[in-house]
Image (tube, rainbow, N blue to C red):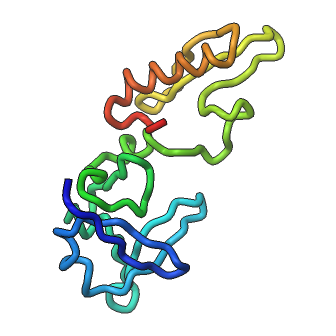
Amino acid sequence: MSETIEIPLTRRAVALIDAADYELVRPYKWHLQVTKHGHRYARTAIGTCGVLLMHRLIVAAPTDVMVDHRDGDGLNNRRFNLREASHSQNLMNQRRTRRPAASGITGVYFDKVSAQWWSYIRVDGRSVRLGYFPTKVDAASARRAAELKHYGEFAPVR
């Protein structure tokens, strides 16, 4: 694996890059960007109203292609951690949902009427119920198996 370099950002944060990409990012002053959902990225200003994200510069992705961080860390911009992805693939490995399940596990819920746990997953824009389970662990296991089956390499890292 290549040498890793820390690029300082505003607010005492750092982004990680491969040493081979240092000359590519060196000319810019990098800032920490935190989205309204808490995702953190390295960005710089281009011109008077443009923004360039470090991970997009490194991958040199066209504007209609998304860049996904395999480990979900938007500041880990080492090449092995970056991959081109469609919008739906990029959403597959989100670390958190906007409104997390009360169980603390995405896609796992407790049904008070049946007194059982149930889980579901979204595939191709539709919800797929995975069934009812006697324990939260069983429901979470079914959810994880479905993520691996349907999301493949884009399944969330846990």
Image-quadrant location for residue 120? top right
Find the residue positioned furthest to the right. 113
Q: Residue at x 44, y 41 (%)?
A: 93
Name the spot of residue 36 as percent of width and height, x first.
60, 63
Q: Residue at x 39, y 69 (%)?
A: 15
Compared across the picture, whether 62 is left or right of 99 comes to: left
Q: Residue at x 83, y 12 (%)?
A: 113
Image-quadrant location for residue 64? bottom left
Compared across the picture, whether 133 is left or right of 31 comes to: right
The answer to whether residue 57 is above or below residue 91 is: below
Q: Nearer the viewer, residue 109 or 8?
A: 8
Q: Residue at x 29, y 53 (%)?
A: 82
Name the spot of residue 61 as percent of width and height, x first.
22, 61
Compared across the picture, whether 83 is left or right of 75 comes to: left
Number of marks in the rendered image: 0
Name the spot of residue 51 as percent of width and height, x first.
38, 78
The answer to whether residue 93 is above or below residue 26 is: above
Name the spot of residue 18 as percent of width and height, x first.
24, 64
Image-quadrant location for residue 109? top right
The answer to whether residue 58 is above or below residue 86 is: below
The answer to whether residue 143 is above or below residue 76 is: above
Q: Nearer the viewer, residue 78 or 6?
A: 6
